[in-house]
Image (tube, rainbow, N blue to C red):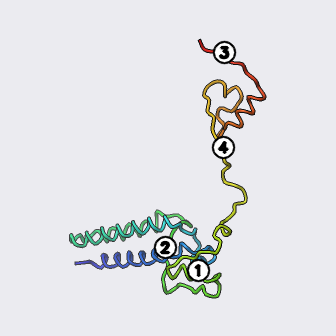
Amino acid sequence: MATPADQRLLELLEKWLKSLELHAKYSSLDDDSYWKIQPWVEHQRPTRWVIDVAMQKTLALRAHVQERVKMGDAKYSESLELMTFLANLVGSEHIERFIPMAAAENERSLTSESRDGAALAILAGGRATPENPRQELPVPARPSMLSGGCRFVVHGEFLKQFNVSHKRGTGQDAFKQIMAQHRIVGHRAG
């Protein structure tokens, strides 16, 4: 027999799951449509993998609660409620990284504001595919990482002498440049 705490907790978990399903649906929206679809509080937009992990954990917690209810554990849900209360009251700091509640009844229409119905297609369960998807890729102001070319690795005192031993991404081109500037004749072993 489920206690009132069990019922409250199971209702809350169902509410969270519905919210996460909406977030999963919204994860395909562009930023402008995402911020217009619900009356969000200020937060960092959750990524799809964060939403998926949250859904997995919520489903696991629901299974634990249902298992404890079947076992007749009347204190389990009460303990979880107390922990949630204390975490919100004492343990949490003001954060922006969370998944806000989304409710279907709060969903706003994007019809007049969506471009070519792309947002509506996504919300209807389809995919918005632009005519030329490569033209819509974001272009960074500067590349996050330069291509390194091929690597030529030599260990030992030789690289320390030319101050390239601890340089990240020291490649064959830099090595050839140094060799052209400083010709060193080595001794054969033996």
Q: Quadrant of residue 112?
A: bottom right
For marks 3 and 4, the one nearer the N-term is 4
* Amino acid at the residue labelled 2: Ala
Q: CA distance from mark 4 to mark 2?
A: 39 Å
Q: Nearer the viewer, mark 4 or mark 1?
A: 4
Q: Nearer the viewer, mark 1 or mark 3?
A: 3
State the residue position of label 1: 119
For marks 1 and 2, the one nearer the N-term is 2
Q: Nearer the viewer, mark 2 or mark 3?
A: 3
Query: Can you name the residue that lies furthest to the front here?
Result: 131
Mark 4 and mark 2 residues within 8 Å of each other at the beta carbon = no
Image side of residue 72 versus residue 138, left or right: left
- Label 3 element class: loop
For marks 1 and 3, the one nearer the N-term is 1
Image side of residue 25 versus residue 146, left or right: left
State the residue position of label 2: 24
* Amino acid at the residue labelled 4: Gly
Residue 59 in percent (x, y) is at 36, 70
User: Which residue: 44% across, 64% down?
Assistant: 53
User: Which residue: 53% across, 81% down?
Assistant: 123
Q: CA distance from mark 3 to mark 4?
A: 30 Å
Q: CA distance from mark 1 to mark 3?
A: 69 Å
For marks 4 and 1, the one nearer the N-term is 1
Query: Can you name the residue that lies furthest to the top here?
Result: 190
Front-most of 85 and 77? 77
User: Which residue: 25% across, 69% down?
Assistant: 68
Bin the neighbour count of mark 2 within 10 Å (Cα to Cα): few under 14, some 14-19, many 20 and up: some
Front-most of 5 and 185? 185
For marks 4 and 2, the one nearer the N-term is 2
State the residue position of label 4: 149
